[in-house]
Amino acid sequence: MELRVLRYFLAVAREENITRAAKLLHITQPTLSRQLMQMEEDLGVVLFHRSKHHIILTDDGMLLRRRAEEIVSLADKTERELQRKEDAVSGEITIGCGETLANMKCLAEGLAAFQTAYPDVTFDIYTGIADDVREHMENGLVDFGMFIEPVDISMYNFLRMPCKERWTVLMRRDHELAKKDSISREDLIGQTIIMAKRQSVRNVVENWLGEQYEHIHIGATMNLSANNKVIAVEKNLGLAVGLEFELTSQEVCQRPLSPPIVTGCVLTWKKTQFVSPLMRRFIQFMKTFFAQYSQNAAQESLYLQ
């Protein structure tokens, strides 16, 4: 498969219309149609369901779209890296991360400081669950991955990030438990809970609950999306147990767990990957930044005491 034809395919998949896609690609509609039919013939599959006014992807088409996006993204990334001048600190750094609060604020502050020092550097941030971030790292689509512990880091080099993430219970403000300052295991007995879908995250909550786990009802499981979690809680689907995040809704509130669960984060990169000069400079910069961030936080804590 040619990269050019994959770009044609992706344009049609996005537009769901060959005429519009051909116009965006600056080629004729018959040329585009021939390229797509040749692709289907070469692959031996049907990629589109065609109708008079639009076309949609088949199951095989959806699989190809996912892989084509990865291939095109990796090709573009490689081209940018090769075009970077040897003596210039410029280019793009890609980072995969989950939805965290404290460490995302720290990371964003570090990225801003790095960009102030090296204004020709841009960042591409991909958000997903740990499994998605890990897959992107294995496929070479992201340079760094930020993971919430516990996580197997045997395949990665890493920098430990300076902040801890606090676990909370998300609930409606009119819920009886909203009157409490913190939520104990016993408070959750008989409650309907929305849990994370990833088993490693669920294990953290299950271990914290201990024997009380048998006395709660799992009403739903969810992947990432703080917004969807808030909506689910607002509509009385249950209480959500997970990492603390920035609330924008006035209908819900968070209460920390007691005894508390706090987890750390690591910024990782593959041991086997090629580390470019830009990546090396970024790693050293962030190592220094994280150390200073921890020192400032410790000094602030002493001052408040």
Image (spheres, rainbow, N blue to C red):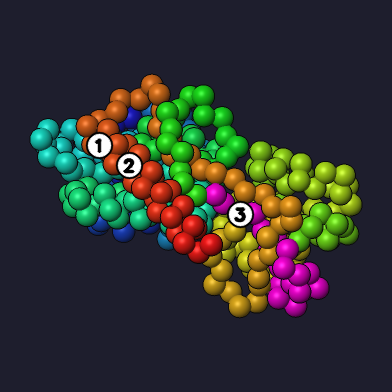
User: Residue sitting at 86 percent across and 49 percent down?
Assistant: 212
**Label 1: element kind:** helix
What separation in Å lies between label 2 and label 1 (alpha carbons)? 11 Å
The first of marks 1 and 3 along the sequence is: 3
Q: Is residue 108 left or right of residue 103?
A: left
Residue designated by label 2: 288
The reply to whether the C-beta atoms of the residues labelled 1 and 3 are less than 8 Å apart is no
* Numbered disc in front, either 2 or 1: 2
Name the kind of residue labelled 3 in the image: Arg
* Relative height, residue 251 to residue 142 (above, below): below
Answer whether residue 172 is magenta in the image: yes
Q: Is residue 214 left or right of residue 178?
A: right
The reply to whether the C-beta atoms of the residues labelled 3 and 2 are less than 8 Å apart is no
Query: What range is drawn magenta here?
Result: 164-182
In the rendered image, which quarter is residue 145 located in?
top left
The first of marks 2 and 1 along the sequence is: 1
Q: Nearer the viewer, residue 75 or 230?
A: 230
* Relative height, residue 279 to residue 255 (above, below): above
Q: Nearer the viewer, residue 139 or 179?
A: 179
User: Residue sitting at 46 percent across and 43 percent down?
Assistant: 161
| The label number, if any, that marks residue 54 in the structure image | none
Is any part of residue 182 visible from this angle?
yes
**Label 2: element kind:** helix
Q: Residue furthest top?
A: 272
Q: Looking at the picture, how far across and down is residue 129, in whole percent?
A: 55, 45
* Numbered disc in front, either 3 or 2: 2
* Relative height, residue 41 to residue 170 (above, below): above
Q: How dense is the environment of label 2, judged by Cα within 10 Å: few (below 14), some, or many (20 and up)? A: few
Q: Looking at the picture, how far across and down is residue 157, in whole percent?
A: 42, 28
| The label number, if any, that marks residue 166 in the structure image | 3
Residue designated by label 1: 281
Answer whether residue 163 is magenta in the image: no
